[in-house]
Amino acid sequence: MELVEVYKQIILEIKNNLKYYQNDDINFIFNENDNSKFKFLSSDKETQDKNTFKSNDNNLSKESKMDKINAQVMRCKKCSLYKIRNNTVLGEGSLNSEIMFIGEGPGENEDLTGRPFVGKAGELLVKIIENVLKLKREDVYMANIVKCRPPGNRNPNDLEVSACINYLHEQIKIINPKIIVPLGSVALSRLLPRYNGITKNRGREMKLILSREDIYDVIPTYHPSYLLRGSQSEINKKKREVWEDIKKIMKKLNMLI
């Protein structure tokens, strides 16, 4: 499909979901039949510039590539969440980690600090990393589907995810983890839309395919916040299930169990 048609479809999708936007968020939406707006897409100079950019980007270190994404995220206004954020939350941890944990979005503490997983759920995740995986927080990489906090900690909507997911995809390519661990149903379904529901899919081995060269093993488990809810017997059951998921992850990484 030509780029012009792709852009037209994106604009049509936005128009069909205007309820998610504020008035000043939609100034860029124009008549999808006006092909003159898209002339730049087919110019040779534009293609040459893109290829040059990609070539230069490939020569950057992992740190420089991640800094570049962070700069883009910090000035991002692709959805209305930018209006209410205190801080963007790109991610944190080792860029050479074999494990990448992915949540759905920043919470209140994350929004205030600019760091992922620093609230109660984050504390529990760190305990799992330290006590079960025998690693430190800084040995793994943590990120979220969206980089700004949705109001009231609600789940990110379709437009917010569409605006943000490419940042995460680029992070994954930079880190190149051996295992990606989506935490909870929202993170799983947004990363791999064909899988819905964490209860029936936790511990299941999956593949994330971003390109022909970028294919990753995925094993989802419960979000740590889910382990903090319910009766003690329910919590204990869910913790045992997470332990089973973590054992599968450790086995894939040839770690001692």
Image (cartoon, rainbow, N blue to C red):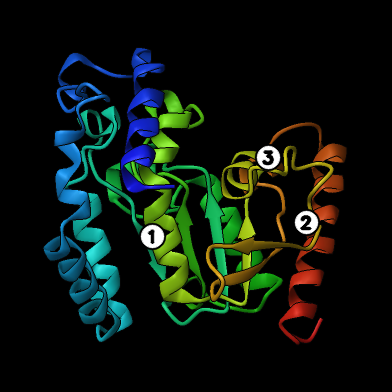
Could you say whether the residue bearing mark 3 is in a helix, strand or loop?
helix
Disc 2, disc 3: CB below 8 Å? Answer: no
Mark 3 or 1: in front is 1
In the image, 44 versus 100, the foreground residue is 44
Q: For residue 226, which numbered disc appears in the image?
A: 3
Which secondary structure, mark 1? strand
Q: Residues within 10 Å of mark 1 (few under 14, many from 20)?
A: many
The image position of residue 205, as x and y in percent, is: 78, 63
At which x and y percent is residue 100? Answer: 55, 67
Where is residue 214? Give x, y as percent.
54, 72
Q: CA distance from mark 3 to mark 1?
A: 21 Å
| Residue matched to label 2 | 242
Placement of 108 over or under 212, stated as above or below: above
Name the amino acid, label 2: Val
Above or below for 122 versus 100: above
Q: Nearer the viewer, residue 92 or 194?
A: 194
Q: CA distance from mark 1 to mark 2?
A: 23 Å
Q: Earlier in the sequence, mark 3 or mark 1?
A: 1
Q: Quadrant of residue 79?
A: top left
Q: Secondary structure at mark 2?
A: helix
- Residue at point 27% right, 47% down? 88
